[in-house]
Amino acid sequence: MIQYRKILELYKKGMSQRTISASIGSSRQTVSKVINRAKEKEITVLTDEMTNTWLKSQLFPSQTPRGRGFVEEDWRYVHAELKKKHMTLRLLHKEYEIRAADEQRLAYSYRTYCQHYNDYARTHRLTLPIKRKPGELLEVDWAGETLHLKDRMSGEAITVYVFVASLPFSQYSYVEGFLDMTAKSWGLGHIHAFEYFKSVPEVLVPDNLKTGVTKAIHAEPVLNEAYRELADYYQTVIVPTRTVKPKDKASVEGNVGYVSRQIIMGLRNIQCFSLGELNAAIHEKLEVLNTTPFQKRDGSRQTVFDTEEHPYMLPLRQPPFEISDWRVSKVQKNYHIQVDRQYYSVPYEYVHCQVDVRLTLDLIEVYFKDSRIASHKRLTGDTGQYQTCVDHMPEHHRKYLAHSPESCLEWAKTVGPNMEKLCTVIIENNVEKRALNILAGIQRLEKQYSVNALETSAEILMGVTMHPTLTGLKQVLKRQKKRQMTESSKTSSQRNTDKNFGFVRGANYFGGNQ
């Protein structure tokens, strides 16, 4: 590149053109041309604004893009358009070429177009917007440094782990402390971050920690079921980083260090006795961090988020997601599963099967091959409690549980008043367990005898004794059945006998009945 300003400065100092040419590495013809053109333009004094670029445009306007016939692009417009989703430099360059053709002027090649935009972008952004779309990513991680609570009783220090979520485009962050780094705390950190942002990003970028990723495979990582369920609820996608690749989420790594310096170190001398008190102090520091103006760009994290990023994020779904825990259990022979020493029923067809169990604060759901087969309200209090749904039982188990004095009396009413009276006497004269066994035997008799036969036999039995028994009822039924069979055979015999049969004429023949 020709050093226009250097040539003029040396010439003003009285150096010859030959010496200037040797000093800056340009030909004598170039040096002579620059000096002569400066005289023609009457440029006698060099000011700070007269840079090489400015001097070139003034001394040789025909060599500028506009002077050579190129259409100048509005790079501020290009920069703003690239913030939109699915927008690329290739598409903007095609539009630029169409506009140049309409004006019958020259257009930059795609390579030159990209070079000019990169020159512009480097002077206006720390990172190129083509790499970080607004509202696209949310990077999450646990901070390496920790805070502490003071136990009121023992005075011991309780470790508090710090969750950090950062939006790469605006650097807008969320920070919260937890007593552990379990899957539940990990999920709550995400939910509270979404509520703080009042929106949801398109992609979540976590580290390969066990609470988020079960198996770290770069192409198709196996996600923790509870974490995947949270992402599905908020309609976002989880894209974990590569293992041992912190630059894949450089923003949150940088913010972790910044948070450690501004918040964690800022609270190192504050004594708190509860997690809520500590998180309130963290929130105050966080507001200061997000509203502090940038040093090398306009605005602050808050203003950039509100004006440039928030409109592109997904709306926050309500109500908030309910954190769940997933476990695997085996259905026992009594068609129940054990969870936290409490027992819940499933349909008896799944006995000895492995099932997935989803636990929430007040609900338990049982899945077999991704299909829900049972759900129960979660039991609390004493261990060893059973929660059983009648529909999950086999038929004979349902009948056994339904067998009670009340159900027996209801059945007796369908037979008749005498059977009801018989069952009432049996219940009054026997302990409940024995009475139920007798009544069960009476109900089984319905398979052998009709309702009328049971009612008639009950009437007969109650007429001869005030202490009826199952054996007595069976004997009455047998006698009644035998008597009916005898009467039936006589009636049949009389019906089949012909009075005119054989040689016996009878009294009618002789007129004896007239």
Image: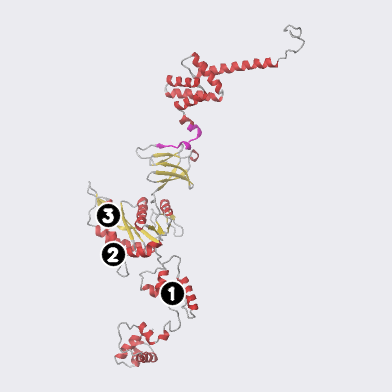
Residue 56 in the image: x percent, y percent?
38, 85
Please rate how many residues cluster around mark 1, counting C-alpha atoms within 10 Å: few if below 14, some from 14 to 19, many from 20. Answer: some
Instruction: Find residue 292 and name its label.
Output: 2
**Gap between marks 3 and 2, in whole Å?**
19 Å
Question: Badge 3 is on which residue?
Answer: 280
- On whether residue 259 falls in the magenta region, the answer is no
Name the residue type under label 1. Cys
Residue 391 in the image: x percent, y percent?
48, 37
Q: Nearer the viewer, residue 327 or 322?
A: 322
Which of the two discs, 1 and 3, labels the residue nearer the N terminus?
1
> What count of labels does the image hold?
3
The nearer-to-camera label among 2 and 1 is 2
Look at the image and give the residue range highlighted in magenta.
386-398
Which of the two discs, 2 and 1, labels the residue nearer the N terminus?
1
- Residue 135 seen by the camera: no
Name the residue type under label 3. Ala
**Gap between marks 1 and 3, in whole Å?**
47 Å
Residue 496 in the image: x percent, y percent?
70, 16
Question: Badge 1 is on which residue?
Answer: 114
Name the residue type under label 2. Thr
- On whether residue 397 falls in the magenta region, the answer is yes
- Residue 48 seen by the camera: yes
Could you tell me which secondary element the residue under label 1 belongs to?
helix
Give the vertical position of 249 relative to 390 (above or below): below
